[in-house]
Image: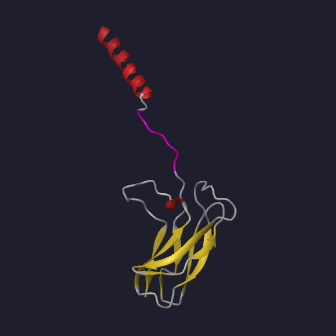
Amino acid sequence: MRVREWTATLGVVVAFAALLTGCGIVEVGPQKCFPSRIHVAPGTAAPGETITVSSEAADCDLGYREGHTYSVAVIAPHHRSPESVVPVDGAGRFSAELTIPADFPSGDAWVVVEGSPYDHCDDTHGSCAGYTTALTIR
């Protein structure tokens, strides 16, 4: 009986000491809200053609105020299209048409969207994802 009481007491003391030192058993913090994935149509385009870039509403509150905008561009190694400033609604929904520049190289490219929570990465080890989607230039 004495061993059981001693073990229970020790468990309470250890748990209490952990709380006093700031060492919680489970760390609970606020979850970040991110926008829905980006869609691009068509997924393959030639220089001079127009693509539509869009996103549906997020599943959470992004905290966007009226007048929020994204900057959207198409990038490839050593190339970047002019940025388009696109209005975004409070839920993160947007749609924009971009024209692929006439001198854009063929191959893999990406649509890059700036102005979302993805821009605020707290990871100092370089593992953050950006708000992008792939595109092929033919």
Q: Main secondary structure of the magenta part?
A: loop
As drawn, 124 above or below 74: above
Extreme residue toward the right, this view: 66
Q: Position of residue 89 (x, y in %)?
A: 66, 64
Q: Nearer the viewer, residue 69 or 51?
A: 69
Extreme residue toward the left, this view: 3
Extreme residue toward the top, this view: 2
Q: Is residue 15 visible?
A: yes
As drawn, 129 above or below 79: above
Q: Position of residue 63 (x, y in %)?
A: 62, 55
What residue span does the magenta drawing correspond to?
23-31
| Occupied quadrant, residue 66 | bottom right
Q: Nearer the viewer, residue 32 or 136?
A: 32
Q: What residue lies at 62% left-to-right and 69% top-to-bottom? A: 94
Q: Left or right: where does residue 68 sit relative to residue 24? A: right
Q: Position of residue 34 (x, y in %)?
A: 53, 58
Q: Give the tally of numbered discs.
A: 0
As drawn, 81 above or below 27: below
Decide whether residue 45 is among the magenta residues.
no
Q: Left or right: where does residue 32 sit relative to residue 68? A: left
As drawn, 12 above or below 90: above
Q: What residue lies at 55% left-to-right and 77% top-to-bottom? A: 83
Q: What residue lies at 53% left-to-right and 72% top-to-bottom? A: 39
The quarter in which the N terminus is drawn is: top left
The quarter in which the C terminus is drawn is: bottom left
Q: Nearer the viewer, residue 80 or 112?
A: 80
Q: Position of residue 133 (x, y in %)?
A: 47, 71
Q: Left or right: where does residue 43 sit relative to residue 9? A: right
